[in-house]
Image (cartoon, grey):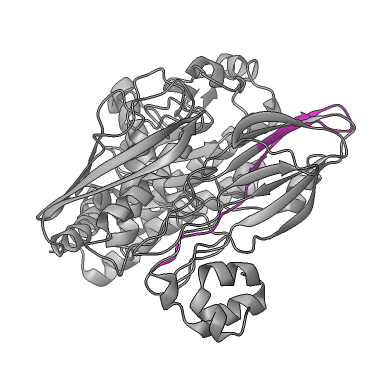
Amino acid sequence: MIDSEINPITLEIWWSRLIAIADEAAATLLRTSFSTVIRESNDYVTVLMDTDGETIGECTLGIPAFAALVGRATRAMLDRFPASTWRQGDVVMTNDPWIGTGHLPDIVVVAPIFHHGALVGFSGSAAHAPDIGGTFKEGPTELIEEGVLIPPVRLYRAGELNDDLVQLLLANIRLKDIVFGDIEAQVNANEVCRRRAVEFLEDTGEPDFKRLGRAVTGLAERAMRAAIAGLPDGVYRGAIEADGVGDQPTRIACAVTIAGDDITVDYDGSSPQVAYAINSTLNYTRAYTIYPLKCLLDPFTRRNEGSYRPIRVTAPAGTILNPTAPAPVMARHLTGHLLSCALFQALSPLMPDRVVADSGGAPALRAHFSGRTADGGRFGQLLFASAGMGASAERDGLSTTAFPTNSGAGSVEAMETVSPLLFLRKAFRPDSGGAGRQRGGLGQDCEILNAAATPIQMVLLGDRERHPALGIMGGGAGAPALAAHRDGRTVPMKSRSLIQPGESVTLSFPGGGGYGPPADRPVAAVETDLKRGVVTTDAVRRDYPTQALALGLK
């Protein structure tokens, strides 16, 4: 039942306003941030929380999986700084991978919200910093090499900046002005969230968010539980392999147990943690388990803490999905993003009409470029370009679409403005979508030139080089990832290399998997793909021989 003290129309209006508060905070973050990682690629989240650190309003854009993580980080901060010790104007920050969003570049910033002298909630944000110090090297690494670890500390105390902390942090990073500018943008976003939350309480006459918080999280929880209860009880298993490191692939195994209106996802049987930066902390593992399940089971109810309560996630300690600190975790997305694939493969017999095939962007390929600008200054740019999404029972996979993350590709012109990078080509990649009754989405080719007079360092953090996105229900795999210099030299997906002046490199992002047998694809759909340049004649002959005959292709 809906909270009887709040009538349904009022509740709908108030709930919408909570989302609007988080969205205005997000708009502030985007408009005041310094880096293209936030401003162009949407690698952030903003939330409004109650006094227990549970989210009651989450921003519409940004990285949806991060929302639950900010709440978990806030609860860890409350263990370090009890609620009674917070003051108006306090700001606490951390990037601890086991507390926050899984790796050091993501900084969580939290501030208290007071109303008439009483603590009524928290505003929070998480955003990816363009630099956090450290270095990158091939082979085994340690967390200490990945950058500066910031435990939960007060950035501001009662409105006073902790300048000693700032100077210590900036002394250990390269892009000082940009990083501190982004942190201050997060502080500003939290302040906007705080002000709008107080205005809301003034306008509604509510003393705090307890009553409304119970109502909205209760509705979200009941909607998720109803969706789970509609499924038959049982244990459903799935497993996939990833490229891993060197010649050692990594394995993700999951058992999805449905019991009444609860789901437990257990990753027992997954690979042990490794001495490379692809380990996924349990926080990150939880986030990228819950979000795909939310999309699959209850896609329309607004997200908040209630959405997450019916889902329990476990993984044995010391595995790649629950590594023991201080394991290296810089590229944790190369493991965490793959969880959606394992989950959907496991649940495909149960709900074949709702799952999607593996996405080429699970995991996302990240390319970090750094070097010197013409005036001798430093630059660091992270390329967020999307791969093909997996196909579903109803339609072809979306091309160049991020999933299960929500990062945007951003403007290449913006990257060119602040760096000596020149994008010569950015185009759909023909034949990259997996064959099937419904075709997988296309990846893309990005050719990038070093227009500087000095070498540029390129760090690739990717996968799907040897393990492409799998099809589902009889569909074919998408094209694998590839990186190559103009002279044909290939670059491993996990590597650091130099791009010489005047030299270019092409990053070929993988395609999504297909859905259903390729023989069942309508001839008209294959003909349309040919006309649009989505597939080539050779690929049609190979993947759709019956349709090729019908089209007169010899």
Furthest residue in direction front, as rendered: 554
At horizontal 52% and vertical 41% (from top left) the residue drawn is 463
Q: 405 or 60, which lies in front?
A: 405
Q: Position of residue 322 (x, y in %)?
A: 32, 29
Q: 105 or 277, which lies in front?
A: 277
Compared across the picture, whether 544 is left or right of 322 comes to right
Quadrant of the image containing the N terminus: bottom left
Figure check: 524 above or below 443? below
Counting every numbered tag in the picture gives 0
Q: Position of residue 321 (x, y in %)?
A: 34, 33
Q: Position of residue 408 (x, y in %)?
A: 58, 53
* 274 within the magenta span: no
Figure check: 223 above or below 271? below
Residue 147 visible in the picture? no
Compared across the picture, whether 402 is left or right of 455 comes to left
Figure check: 13 above or below 379? below
The stretch of residues the image draws in magenta is: 368-392
At horizontal 34% and vertical 30% (from top left) the residue drawn is 271
